[in-house]
Image (spheres, rainbow, N blue to C red):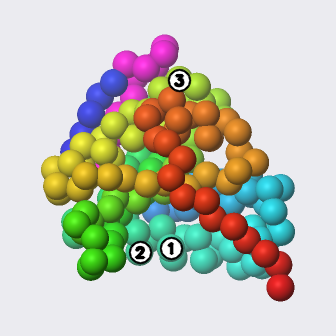
């Protein structure tokens, strides 16, 4: 899967991540984690968060190259964003058995509002449709109004409310 796009002033490539991309994607994943820290204490990072992030990303990219999930990167001169996608099994009692899950998604600040997330999402949804998935979901922190607005503009609608309580 490879797509060249001319997006708001730059040429961009959307492609499946390779093991060689692991360190760069892990750094972007670290940046995303830092963005969430201000939203809630739930997102406090461990001391070894970067090492954990790299192991997580390597695992996801390995599963992506075997077809068990998808990690996409958006590349200009360097990787400027990424998206992860998976297929999860639903409750065996319901008719719709497979649900696509999008996330995490991150685009560096200099490339935001230029169509990068939309290009990544387009390819992820295409991948899910090719696997006969009818629905896709994603999560956004309720305090992240920018992300909620972006996902809503792409056609995602609120479906589930996740409540949390500190014990």
Q: Which mark is residue 15?
A: none
Residue 42 can be seen, yes or no: yes
Which residue is tagged 2? 59
Q: Position of residue 16 (x, y in %)?
A: 31, 51
Give the image quarter of residue 50: bottom right
Q: Say if the magenta span includes residue 61.
A: no
Q: Is residue 60 above or below residue 4?
A: below
Quadrant where the N terminus lies? Answer: top left
Q: Magenta region, mostly helix, strand or loop?
A: strand
Q: CA distance from mark 2 to mark 1?
A: 5 Å
Residue 6 falls in image quadrant: top left
Q: Residue at x 40, y 59 (%)?
A: 101
Farthest top residue? Answer: 9
Query: What is the secondary structure assignment of the residue under circle 1?
Result: helix
Q: Are marks 2 and 1 in contact (CB under 8 Å)?
A: yes
Q: Which residue is mark 3?
A: 114
- Label 3 residue SS: loop
* Label 3 or label 2, whichever comes before in sequence order: 2
Other residues around mark 1 within 10 Å, as few (<14) / some (14–19) / many (≥20): some
Give the residue number, with chain letter if any, for mark 1: 56
Is 15 included in the stretch rendered in magenta? yes
- Give the residue at x 24% y 43%: 126
Above or below: residue 52 compared with residue 122: below
Q: Is residue 81 visible?
A: no
Occupied quadrant, residue 148: top right
Q: Is residue 19 left or right of residue 115?
A: left
Residue at the (75%, 48%) spot, across then down: 143
For the record, the magenta segment spans: 6-18
Q: Is residue 32 left or right of residue 57?
A: right
Q: Identify the image quadrant of the C terminus.
A: bottom right
Residue at (34%, 37%) from the top-left corner? 122
- What is the x, y in percent for residue 91? 33, 76
């Amino acid at each position: 899967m490879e797509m060249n796009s001319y997006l708001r002033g730059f040429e961009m490539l959307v492609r499946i991540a390779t093991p060689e991309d692991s360190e760069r994607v892990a750094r972007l994943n670290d940046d995303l984690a830092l963005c969430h820290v201000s939203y809630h204490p739930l997102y406090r990072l461990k001391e070894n968060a970067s090492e954990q992030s790299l192991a997580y990303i390597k695992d996801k990219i390995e599963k992506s190259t075997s077809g068990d999930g998808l990690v996409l990167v958006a590349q200009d001169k360097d990787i400027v964003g990424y998206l992860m996608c998976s297929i999860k099994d639903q409750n065996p009692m319901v008719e719709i058995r497979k649900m696509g899950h999008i996330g995490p998604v991150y685009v560096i600040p200099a490339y935001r509002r230029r169509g990068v997330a939309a290009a990544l999402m387009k390819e992820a949804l295409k991948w899910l449709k090719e696997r006969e998935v009818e629905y896709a979901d994603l999560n956004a922190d309720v305090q992240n109004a920018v992300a909620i607005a972006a996902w809503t503009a792409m056609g995602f609608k609120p479906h589930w409310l996740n409540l949390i309580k500190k014990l």
